[in-house]
Image (tube, rainbow, N blue to C red):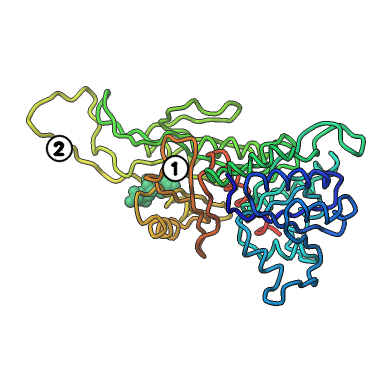
Amino acid sequence: MLNGKVIVLGVTGGIAAYKAATLCSRLVQRGADVHVIMTESAKQFIPELTLQTLTKNPVYSDTFDERDPSVVSHIHLADLADLFLIAPATANIIGKMAHGLADDMLSTTLLATTAPVMISPAMNVHMYTHPAVMANMQTLVSRGVSMIEPGEGLLACGYVGKGRMEEPETIVDVVERFFWDGAAPSVLQNEEMANSSTGILHGKKVVVTAGGTIERIDPVRYITNDSSGKMGFAVAKAAKQLGADVHLIAAHTDEAPPEGIRTEKVNSAQDMYEAVQRVFETSDIVVKAAAVADYRPVETATSKIKKRGETMTLELVKTTDILESLGRQKTSQFLIGFAAETDTVEYFAKDKLKRKNCDLIVANDVTQEGAGFGTDTNSVQIFDKEGLVLQLPVISKEEVALRLLTLAADRLSGRSS
Ligand code: CTP
């Protein structure tokens, strides 16, 4: 499964470093070409020779130990990687990554790589739940780093709790799945990050719109669209998970709205416009995931329209563009729009971002497999005024939502600091 894949494995200094030997062995058995970078502390727990023997590649730990004069080792390794995996990842390396520090071979190579990065944290339960570590992990997730959540159990320090590095076999499964379908794990589903006062959206009011609006033709007929509401619901759930006060405004959907979230049901674009207007002023983030009808019938018949001639003409009139009006009104609100396209995705997304004065726009090609209406997954590109900010592979809508909101939270806190 991993034939021909180059995995750079960073091993940092925690007791779980001993598991790196099994991890190397399993990855090599599956066909991966594994190159190990150890920190000095990791060498206290496991000898370099063990990992060198298992991978049949030299093990690096000193940035200045240049063995091949034709290359600069940290750049060479950074470029070589199809995946950068750090297991175990200590609180220290997580902190260094979050703040962009480069004071050893591992952190320097991490800054130089453009490969996807996956980390498997391992530490004492109180360290893992420390707000500083949580915040650093959230920063990394918002930048697209994948996390393999640690398990719960008896830790080497004697405590029982979360912090035990995931078993090597499970990590290999996650890596294989990543190469197979691009699916990456997330760390943000864990309870410590959710709903607590450490949640990155704690104290923020998030308004989310979801579903497709319904524009009535007569009492039994209407115009709508293919929106399932799943993406908007995932955003509402993620916002709650991250500690926000969430107000969901839901039009027509296939699913029941998420439990435990204040939900206002609406039908038409006009209803949605009025509902959003009532809460916009006091909101911090507004996510317009709804598919709003661009046109509605000029008139809605009060009784069922009867079949008459061979053809029938329905006269439509433009609805209010809710997002555009919010873009004109906004003061401090952070505005996120969506652009579901069938072609020329980047061009249309950027045009909408500018026209509607959004802070971010989430664009996807709904013709792509695993993306768009009705599916549980999505594949999106997120743009700001400067251009592409984040490109995500096909991942669950829940995960897209978490990545989107951590990015928004990061930008909001940047504004206030
Ligand atoms: N939107 C809105 N009100 C409308 C139409 C769209 O708030 N009347 C919002 C959507 O919720 C979405 C964004 O604008 O966040 C982009 O929606 P989309 O339908 O893709 O944009 P349009 O401007 O309608 O462009 P077009 O239909 O021509 O692609």
**N-terminal-most mark, 2 or 1:** 2
- Which image quarter is the N terminus in? top right
Taking the image as drawn, is residue 280 in sight? Answer: no
Which residue is drawn at the image coordinates 81% and 50% (left, top)?
91
Q: What residue type is labelled 1?
A: Ala
Judged left or right of residue 368, residue 180 is right
- Total labels drawn: 2
Which residue is drawn at the image coordinates 34% and 53% (left, top)?
343
Tell me if label 2 and label 1 are in contact, CB under 8 Å. no
Which residue is most to the bottom?
69
Taking the image as drawn, is residue 138 in sight? Answer: yes
Between 157 and 313, which is closer to the camera in this rendering?
157
Rendering quarter of residue 244: top right
Report the mark closest to the observer, 2 or 1. 1
Identify the secondary structure beneath mark 1.
loop
Judged left or right of residue 388, residue 149 is right
Identify the secondary structure beneath mark 2.
loop
What is the x, y in percent for residue 299? Answer: 23, 35
Q: Which mark is residue 313?
A: 2
Q: Which mark is residue 398?
A: none
- Which image quarter is the C terminus in? bottom right
Which residue is most to the right?
158
Residue 40 position (above or below residue 230): below
What is the x, y in percent for residue 216? Answer: 29, 31
Residue identified by numbered label 1: 371
Q: What residue type is labelled 2?
A: Thr
How far is mark 2 from mark 1, CA to CA? Answer: 34 Å
Which residue is drawn at the image coordinates 80% and 38% (left, top)?
164
Rendering quarter of residue 106: bottom right
